[in-house]
Image (cartoon, grey):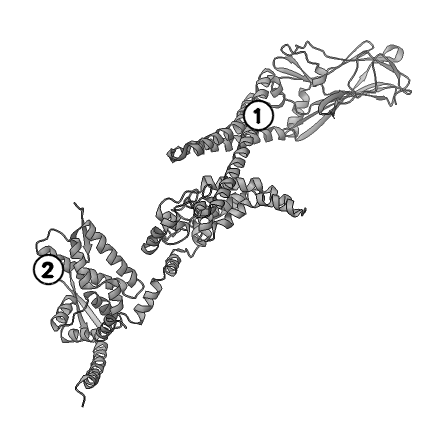
Amino acid sequence: MQKIINIHLAGRIIPMDESAYELLREYLDSLRKHFSGEEGGEEIIHDMEDRIGELFQDCIRKGQACVLTEDVKVVMSVMGSPEQIIHETGDDQAETNNSEHTHSTSSSEAYADKIVSRRLCRSEQEKVIGGVCGGIGMYLQTDPAIIRIFFAIITLAWGTGIWVYLLLWILLPVCQEQPVALRRRLYRNTNQKFIAGVCSGIASYFRIDPIFVRLVFLLPWISIPFFNIADVSNFLFPAFAGSMPSTLIIYLILWISLPKANTLTEKLEMSGAVPDVHNLSQAIKSQGSHTHPWPTSQSKGNSILAAILKGILLAILFFVLFIFLAIMMSMVAGFLGIASVSMILFPITDLLVADSMQTWMLWICGLLVLVLPIVLLVRFIIRLFKKKTEKRTKSWITISLITLFVLSVFGFFSIVGNIATDFRITYQQPEKYILTKPQKDTLYIRQQIEDQSISMYGWEIDTDELGFRLVDDTTLAISTVSVEIKESADSLYHINIIKTAQGKSQKKAMERIDKIDFSFKQVGDTLVLPKDIILSHGNPFRGQKVQVKLFIPKGHSFYLTTPINSEFRKTDLKINNGNISYKHRNYSPWIKDRYYTVGKDVW
Amino acid sequence: MNIENAQSQMRKGVLEFCILSIIKRSEVYPSEILEQLKDAGLNVLEGTLYPLLTRLKNAGFLSYRWEESASGPPRKYFSLTDKGDEFYQALAQTWTQLTEAVQKLTGPSN
């Protein structure tokens, strides 16, 4: 049983069955191909179709329901086979046309010339974002995938790729003429694959033997034994060995992004041959010899070596992936640990972040940044092992995860940057006061914590160590107060208080300074100074500090009843036999419970 | 040397001339040309006619007009142009010379 196909031959409608149609189509196609280069070729074909139609109509008139294969064969013998026609009507023009057309590569090149765009334009069909890469690919006759990789690489150089792309997107016009797709595309050649066919695909594209591409990828690995044996130590070795992870990463990226050349058309596109009748039949013939993967056709020794090499490569690949995964997971664990601790120590985040919204954003973005790559990696590994049954329609999940990741990175860094700019401007504001002279010309100095403070949720922590303490649930106090004692220029006791704060702008900084509440008092002969600065909720740490400068007249003395902070704390970090220890030093030239005389001990 | 090759070479030589003669006699369309050729005993592959017709037309030796037909799509009716007529005359002359020479060569030896 056969399908009936109605065809239209130069004005006549002829019904014919499927196989007759196939035969006729082949016949007409080869005729058309041979006469296409000639002037008036279209007319010749049209006239021939007219005659063929006439002959077929005679068949039908004689009582047949439709044209059958035998009828087509009869007509073909009456008209003559294409070779015969060429031969019999040959003159110089036809002959030269023939010799051109039987050379398929030149014909495919001639075909290809028609598709090269004369102007650089944006492609409407071949586009992922704006068709820029597609258009450039058409103009240069290369696979747009290569252009995209090029853009991605130059984007690493301070985002050049993005600017160039946007510029081109605006400047280039959309392609007017729609060229038939000549495609010479970068595919993965899974027929000649070693691991994933990446190298074979690249090799087919550039029409070289895959072994060269594989050597390039394996270069870092080879270079290690090479340089060790040759014992040549110069700058080249680190360059080669160092490129190991990059070649691996590039290979992985190409593995994921390049499609497999499945259909015959794609396989031909891979090497840049036009998929016409000639090339396709050649490809089918040669397919038999290429369906074996690379090592099989070689000797047994080679195949064992190849298998070992393949095993080593895969092992190293998985090892690297594993390490990456482990690092990410530990980072997430650490992050979560910090997060949970700081949930308890919520004021700590208050220390840095002004409002709670920013805090939440910061934590969320940070978490996503660390978690999402793990998720994506796990998905990728699962897909690797799940083989071919995985449908590609799930890729929108991957895309949305990746988008989320990028957004989180941006969010995280933008918040961090936001906070950082808040430290930009430093502003100082001095206040000057005069103290009443104490009796006996001796000033007692005390530095203490004014208010009640709570211990931190049951932890006994030496707040001196930490440098801050919790006053209540939402208020923090930081010990950034320093006291200096100097000789007074006159006979009065002066106290200068210099408040410093930072902010995005001078105005902001000044606001923060105003918020600093540093109230000292003189009780009789004793000067009581606060030990730290209170930062309440909504007033984050922005470099607030207070410098107290005490000027005592010569000959008078002072006595410390409590230790005072003279300088800001310095922390010594010592690494000793693998142990890390730190010690805070409060550099203070004055110790307590001692009388110092200005002029003798202080000047 | 191929027999078919030599034969087709001979046919090739005269086909153009025969076609022009047919057209000179009267305005004809391609199927008619094929009929007359067959009737005269010249068995050509039909497909060889059309390239020749088009080339002759492109060279300016033939012209055609369309005419509606009762039984199917319109037909091309070919006729000789003046240039075509000149071309025909030259060919006819060559033909006469050729046949005379060949007859002399293949005739009974004197």
Q: Which amino acid does the dot numbered 1 rest on?
A: Ser
Residue A330 in picture, x, y percent from top left: 57, 25
Q: Nearer the viewer, residue A587 or A59?
A: A59
* Residue A95 figure quarter: bottom left
Residue A104 in picture, x, y percent from top left: 36, 59
Of the numbered discs in the image, which one, if any, rests on residue B71? 2
Mark 2, secondary structure of its residue: loop
Q: Nearer the viewer, residue A489 or A90?
A: A90
**Lateral position of residue A542 relative to residue B75, left or right:** right
Residue B45 in picture, x, y percent from top left: 19, 66
Q: Residues within 10 Å of mark 1 (few under 14, many from 20)?
A: few
- Tag 1 near tag 2, CB within 8 Å: no
Can you identify the residue that label 1 sits on? A330
Q: Nearer the viewer, mark 1 or mark 2?
A: 1
**Lateral position of residue A230 relative to residue A589, left or right:** left
Tell me the quarter of the image containing the C terminus of chain A. Answer: top right
Question: Which chain does tag 1 point to?
Answer: A
**Lateral position of residue A188 relative to residue A445, left or right:** left
* Residue A473 figure quarter: top right
